[in-house]
Image: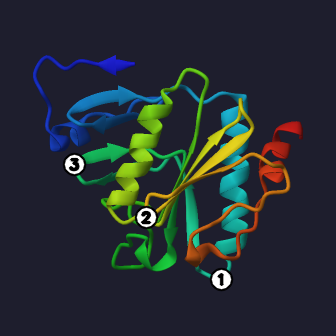
Amino acid sequence: MVQVPTKPLTLEEFLALPETKPASEFIDGNILQKPMPQGVHSTLQGDLTSAINAALKPSKIGRAYPELRCTFGGRSIVPDVAVFRWERIPRQPDGRVENVFMLPPDWTIEILSPEQSQSRVIRNILHCLSHGAEMGWLLDPEEGCIFVYSADHLMQLFDQPDSVLPVPAFAGAVRLTVGEIFGWLQA
């Protein structure tokens, strides 16, 4: 859904607006609302976040965040899962995590919803990569495949259940297969 403001908004004006449910993103001067997550999307998002955090968080290697607003490069986007290396997580002087993340994730993960534009989601992944992200995943639950984009803009398709998915170098402790990820939908 596109919300057309009466006059063009700046990124700063967009960020001053109240949050919407589901979240809205600011892309190329436009406010675009994400689709409302449903069962498949929520299952994959929750289990991916948990699996990544189980592998990275105890050793303070990184942390996965669901639906975290990331503002950088003239856009404000909300990846389904944003993963940050531990040392890049914005922190307050007392060490607590900041509320505002004005930087790209190191690893961005998007889950395609049936009514969502694949091109728009890919553009967000590529935007992250062009601003320093190491990797992007696009899960297509309908097709049972995962597209993996790397920082050199190489794209790989994984659709075999036993395929182990590549992860960014910092996230080597994360070992997931296509079958495991889509198997979460059976539970």
Spatial CA span between label 1 and label 3: 33 Å
- Label for residue 59? 1
Residue 56 sits above or below residue 137 on the image: below
Q: Which mark is residue 74?
A: 3
**Left or right: 179 with respect to 46?**
right
Q: Amino acid at mark 3?
A: Gly
Residue drawn at x 19%, y 42% is: 11
Whether residue 83 appears in this view of the structure is yes
Which of the marked residues, 2 or 3, is nearer the chain's N terminus? Answer: 3
* Mark 2 in CB contact with mark 1 (< 8 angstroms): no
Q: Nearer the viewer, mark 2 or mark 3?
A: 2
The local crowd at label 2, few if under 14, some if 14 to 19, many if 20 or more residues have their Cα within 10 Å, is few
- Whole-Å distance between the Cαs marked 2 and 1? 28 Å
Residue carrying label 2: 152
Q: Secondary structure at mark 1?
A: loop
Residue 60 spot, x, y in % from top left = 59, 80
Asked whether the viewer can see residue 101, the reply is no
Amino acid at dot 1: Ser
